[in-house]
Structures are given as C-alpha cells and as structure tokens.
Amino acid sequence: QVQLVESGGGSVQAGGSLRVSCAASGYIYGYCMAWFRQPPGKEREGVATIPTGNGIPAYADSVKGRFTISRDNGKNTLYLQMNSLKPEDTAIYFCAAATWRVCISPMEVLLSRQDAFEYWGQGTQVTVST
C-alpha cells in the first residue's frame, strides 16, 4: 500500500505557473501514477498519467503543451508543473497511483479510468484568477 499527500497548491493569476507535488509514503517505482482534478461544481477529470518507467506520459487535450507530469522514484514523489494557467484550470488536484496490473493499459486510456486507480491523495486546491 502507499499513502499519497499532495502539496503546492495555491492561488495564482492567469498566465502564471505553479507546481504541485505528491509525496508517497512508500516506493512508487511499481506504480503508474496520475493527476486528476475536480473543478467547482463539476465531475473529476483526468489531467495527466505517467507510466512506471521511462515511458511517454499522456495528457488531457485541455492541458497539452502547458502541463508536464514527472516523477522522481528516488524521492517517491510525483509532480505536475503547470504553466500558462487559465481560470478554467481552477480545481482541486488529486494524485493517484495504480499497481502494475492497471499499468499495462495505455496511458491515454487511463485518463478516463479513475476507477482503475487504487490509491488517492486528499487533494490540493489550485485557484487561477483573471
């Protein structure tokens, strides 16, 4: 099992940048991981997924070219670098982890498979103002 704790959320003006982190209580090298977000009054949605090794991440169309997901297995930490932020990026951001059985699926597919992720953090608020 792994416990996940997000940090780094906050308020930023449109066009700005923010990096959120997700620290795991144990080793993450065997997990594929993801960031999801829940905008106010809306359903939670996939933002980015990253495989266990050095494979290629996947991104939601709404964040492609602006967000970068990365992982540091040595520090057991997942990151999401968010640039050129827009007000519509305002949401609670959650990190999630899935074991290898799930990780054989394409990362693009996992963007819409919240149910496949077994471990979740409590979320961190990101607010983008105009």
Image (cartoon, rainbow, N blue to C red):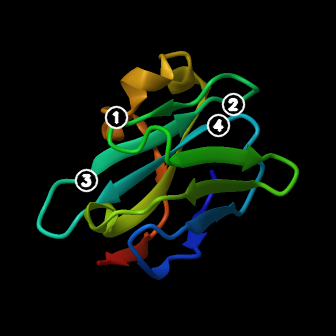
Q: Earlier in the sequence, mark 2 or mark 3?
A: 3
Q: How far apart are marks 2 and 1 (CA)?
A: 22 Å
In 3D space, how far apart are the residues under numbered discs 4 and 1 (Cα atoms)?
Answer: 23 Å
**Circle number at residue 52:** 2
Give the residue number, with chain letter if any, for mark 4. 31
Q: Which of marks 4 and 3 is nearer the N terminus?
A: 4
Which label sits in the foreground, 4 or 1?
A: 1
Measured Cα–Cα span from mark 3 to mark 1: 15 Å
Residue that carries the numbered disc 1 in the rendered image: 61
Q: How far apart are marks 4 and 2 (CA)?
A: 5 Å
Cβ atoms under marks 4 and 2 closer than 8 Å: yes
Percent position (x, y) of residue 74? 88, 50
Q: Is mark 2 on a helix, strand or loop?
A: loop
Please tell me which residue is depicted at 14% across the width and 59% down the height of the picture.
Answer: 42
Q: Is residue 45 above or below residue 95?
A: above
The first of marks 4 and 2 along the sequence is: 4
Label located before the other in sequence (3 or 1):
3
| Amino acid type of the residue tagged 4 in the rendering | Tyr
Q: Which residue is drawn at 76% across and 26% down?
A: 54
Between marks 2 and 3, how big is the CA–CA gap? 23 Å
Could you say where residue 27 lies in the image, as x and y percent from the top left?
Answer: 78, 49
Picture layout, residue 51 above or below residue 44: above
Local crowd size for mark 4, using a 10 Å CA cut-off: few (<14), some (14–19), many (≥20): many
